[in-house]
Image (cartoon, coloured by chain):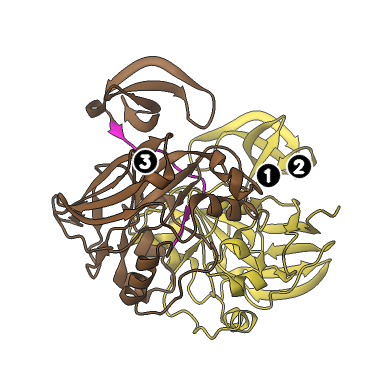
Chain colours: A yellow, B brown
Amino acid sequence: MKWLRYKAHAEVHYGVLEDGGIRQMRGTPFGPHEPDGKKHALGDVALLPPVMPQTFYAVGANYVAHAHEANTLLKRNNAVPKKPDVGYRATSALIAHDEPIVIPADSAGVIQFEGELVAVIGRTAKRVSEAEALSYVLGYTIGNDVSERVWQAQDRTIWRSKNSDTFKPMGPWIETEVDLVQLVTRVRLNGKQVSEFNTNNMVFGVARYISEISQYITMHPGDVIWMGAEAPTLDMRHGDVVEVEIGNIGVLRNPVVAEGRGP
Amino acid sequence: MKWLRYKAHAEVHYGVLEDGGIRQMRGTPFGPHEPDGKKHALGDVALLPPVMPQTFYAVGANYVAHAHEANTLLKRNNAVPKKPDVGYRATSALIAHDEPIVIPADSAGVIQFEGELVAVIGRTAKRVSEAEALSYVLGYTIGNDVSERVWQAQDRTIWRSKNSDTFKPMGPWIETEVDLVQLVTRVRLNGKQVSEFNTNNMVFGVARYISEISQYITMHPGDVIWMGAEAPTLDMRHGDVVEVEIGNIGVLRNPVVAEGRGP
């Protein structure tokens, strides 16, 4: 089942993808819900990020080749993580499928994609075991962890390099039926495939992260965990279109524009 | 004016402190609001964190003596920041005035307070100048940036050292009339003053941070910026009561309990 969040007639709704159209729902995927009788064509609504999380978790250096690539990009020499330590991102950076990624005017211009699996928490999780962790996931969506590498290397934190407005495309929807071990992530730049990897080939997987986080922090319905990307993560320029496809979840597509220039 | 957020009769409301009691409001301080005619005694309601931010910003190493103290605590040698880089915290860690700070069962036990001024954003801010930045602040509250120093030194990120459940007491309310340069922060442990400093004696002040963040990130009504603490930041133990008092804002008080032990 694919859950979408969108704006139709100036109101925000959740709906379910059916026969290429949207069956609108009363309620949300995180609580009671039922069809409200309305339907929309997919092209008639403005998609929104499929959830606005209370807490936005993001995993860094969770694939071996990218962990090494990041050392080169950022002129450092960090080891591949030995335990699952997570980070945070700003929800203000989230944009939807098809919305433009805007390169800030004063960026040095090294703006890269990172195509990532996103786990969406479906129910409150505290102190859950690794074995039961995946039962707390409502479903999965796709994220593009856009990064400004010059700022990432020079700032004390990743606040603007990873969280500037529009730097967190997420969508297009939440797929509830996912077999993690079957997933393949593919990134295309202007239609040409530039990255392909087995999504689940992580240093620490979704279940391990949820279990570890929940030992200390109560996870809430709608929280998201961005699971990291594998190398290569390449530059994007004004006029590019970037697509991240993950298995049966779908394709997250966003154009890239330089601030102050038309698309 | 002091804005409180609280639960009364199982419903969440905003109200304003008047003559030691609460005048309940319809709406929020971030939008249209008016008295709804109801009043409460302060002791009859359960205070909540005065706002649940969309994005929770926190400034590290923003006072010179604490920047040096942190180097000793964390066995590192970072310079005092040369520009205002901000970090993020998890809203799931927020608790209200009088709620207990819980020391996790597997903590090594080095749990410290950091008494901090918190600026609450009142209206949408993007690309605001330092001169106009303070006009985007609704008011100020108080935060205690509780930190587990062993985890902070050993983890790759500050995810659990700074964000474990209950580690972010905030309150008791938002004071809208504040003269930043007059503020003094005092921290008391079991009634004894253990820290005192001029609140505004920051490496980079509130206006500078808001201006800098807003160059890249749209700040939203209700977003909070925790402005950092001055040295000393001292250990808290089971049974302690910690109070952070800042000028005319008020006193944020929380008991400290070890997980699994009664108060």
Q: As displayed, is residue B109 above or below residue A220? A: below
- Please name the residue shown 63% across and 59% down the image: A142
In which quadrant of the rendered view does residue A12 lie?
top right
Q: Residues within 10 Å of mark 1 (few under 14, many from 20)?
A: some
**Could you tell me residue B32's position as x and y percent?**
54, 24
* Magenta stretch, residue numbers: B46-60
Real-space Cα separation, disc 2 to disc 3, in angstroms:
40 Å
Q: Which residue is mark 1?
A: A17
* Residue B54 drawn in magenta: yes
Compared across the picture, whether A190 is left or right of B214 comes to right
- Judging from the image, mark 3 belongs to the subunit labelled B
Q: Nearer the viewer, mark 2 or mark 3?
A: 3
Instruction: Return the residue nearer the eye: A40 or A234.
Output: A234
Residue bearing mark 3: B49
Residue B175, quarter of picture: top left
Q: State whether residue B56 appears in this view.
A: no
Residue A246: in sight, yes or no? yes
* Chain of the residue that carries numbered disc 1 in the rendered image: A
